[in-house]
Image (tube, rainbow, N blue to C red):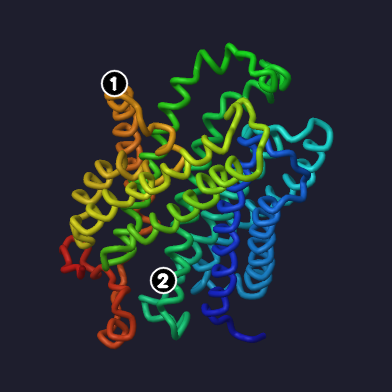
């Protein structure tokens, strides 16, 4: 039997991370279409992007499982196969969700809810697939730093990890919307029928808990931002990676979430939905005008990224990441556009859950830090070959000197 090369996992996790990115991009596009009430079939451009991503993750998992069955007994590389265990579960859920989604829309029409049986299974599967593939790519990055020859082009492995982090960040934010989708809950559990929403009639359940739902989602966005700020700082010694990760997400939100809605309202005459009544070209133009303001969400991330040394001690980094959380929440485009123009009382109310969310993100960091910690060293030759990837010394108590 041919011996196992860790480099064989690079295309597996690379294709899987690309698939995870396409999933979150397609999902954002699809949500925008549903908000506008655009009449569609199951076979839409947004669905094509989404399910292409699902297909790529499934293909990566298929190859990964083949490698695991052939070489899983090699204990030296067991940890490198760990991400596949999570990703395979995600793919299984996605494959189950696809026919259910087709059936649900065929029988009940194209509802604009996230919290339906098919969409719920799909969203959980998307998140698990992204987590598994990104953790697998991080494992390869750590193995490369430990001396394993994964690839002769370390920048490629770095790019895969950064894209994976951006995808996971977007997926976690999307999970926040799903967990707080009161309209979907009311529809799925029969509290309010679909005709209530289509006729723009008030649903008492949604009205009663809408404020709580929004505050919880804001907290989730802050917790997510804090966690990924900390994660990027831990994984990479060169500053700017957090900004790059956030920029990838901003491009997705700016084009497929905000940008598509602005374009559709201006040129496609969409009917609208209870989320957005009577969309018009004027509304589309106004929304397009907010995109430059939304792009400013990167400014605090950029400043904090370059102001906080990557080599800072663990406790200080956790604390600062918790404080970054409320600013990082603005990376989510729908969140930012939704609160633009709010008065000071609303902003103060938002500050409370976002600060608490940052604290929650800090708690998550302390729980998961052993899985993401880097305690390897590389030779001077490795550093010269790949200066962007610097690592923490073996001495966890010594504060290393980071590069900017």
In the picture, the disc for residue 158 is 2
Along the viewing direction, whichever of 71 and 109 lies nearer the viewer: 109
Q: Distance between the residues labelled 2 and 1?
A: 42 Å
Whole-percent x, y for residue 137 in the image: 48, 66
- Pair 2/1: label in front: 1
Along the viewing direction, whichever of 367 and 45 lies nearer the viewer: 45
Q: In this view, does 116 lie to the left or right of 238?
A: right
Q: Which residue is drawn at 77% across and 46% down?
A: 42
Position of 372 relative to 196 (above/below) = below
Whole-percent x, y for residue 41 in the image: 78, 44
The residue beneath circle 1 is 345
Res 133 → quadrant: bottom right
Q: Residue at x 60, y 50 (%)?
A: 126
Secondary structure found at label 1: helix
Position of 273 relative to 240 (above/below) = above
- Callout 1 crowding tier (Cα within 10 Å): few <14, some 14–19, many ≥20: few
């Amino acid at each position: 039997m041919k011996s196992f090369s860790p480099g064989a996992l690079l295309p597996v996790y690379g294709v899987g991370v690309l698939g995870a990115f396409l999933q979150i991009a397609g999902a954002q596009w699809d949500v925008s279409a549903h908000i506008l009430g655009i009449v569609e079939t199951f076979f839409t451009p947004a669905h094509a992007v989404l399910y292409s991503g699902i297909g790529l993750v499934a293909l990566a998992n298929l190859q990964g499982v083949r490698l695991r069955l052939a070489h899983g007994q090699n204990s030296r590389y067991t940890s490198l196969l760990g991400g596949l265990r999570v990703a395979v579960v995600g793919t299984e859920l996605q494959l189950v969700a696809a026919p259910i989604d087709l059936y649900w829309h065929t029988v009940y029409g194209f509802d604009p809810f996230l919290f339906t049986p098919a969409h719920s299974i799909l969203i959980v599967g998307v998140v698990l697939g992204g987590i598994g593939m990104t953790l697998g790519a991080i494992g390869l990055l750590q193995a490369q730093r430990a001396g394993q020859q994964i690839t002769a082009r370390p920048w490629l492995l770095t790019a895969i990890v950064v894209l994976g982090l951006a995808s996971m960040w977007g997926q976690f934010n999307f999970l926040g919307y799903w967990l707080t989708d009161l309209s979907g809950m009311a529809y799925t559990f029969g509290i309010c029928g679909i005709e209530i929403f289509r006729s723009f009639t008030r649903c008492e359940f949604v009205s009663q808990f809408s404020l709580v739902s929004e505050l919880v989602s804001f907290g989730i966005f802050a917790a997510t931002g804090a966690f990924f700020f900390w994660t990027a700082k831990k994984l990479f010694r060169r500053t700017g990676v957090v900004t790059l990760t956030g920029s990838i997400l901003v491009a997705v939100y700016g084009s497929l979430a905000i940008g598509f809605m602005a374009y559709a309202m201006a040129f496609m005459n969409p009917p609208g939905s209870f989320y957005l009544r009577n969309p018009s070209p004027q509304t589309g133009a106004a929304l397009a005008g907010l995109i430059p303001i939304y792009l400013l969400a990167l400014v605090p991330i950029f400043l904090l990224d370059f102001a906080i040394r990557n080599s800072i001690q663990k406790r200080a980094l956790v604390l600062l990441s918790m404080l970054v959380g409320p600013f990082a929440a603005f990376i989510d485009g729908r969140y930012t556009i939704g609160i633009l123009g709010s008065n000071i009382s609303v902003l103060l109310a938002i500050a409370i859950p976002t600060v608490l969310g940052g604290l929650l993100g800090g708690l998550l960091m302390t729980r998961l830090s052993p899985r993401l910690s880097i305690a390897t060293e590389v030779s001077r030759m490795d550093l010269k070959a790949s200066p962007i990837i610097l690592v923490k010394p073996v001495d966890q108590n010594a504060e290393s000197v980071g590069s900017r």
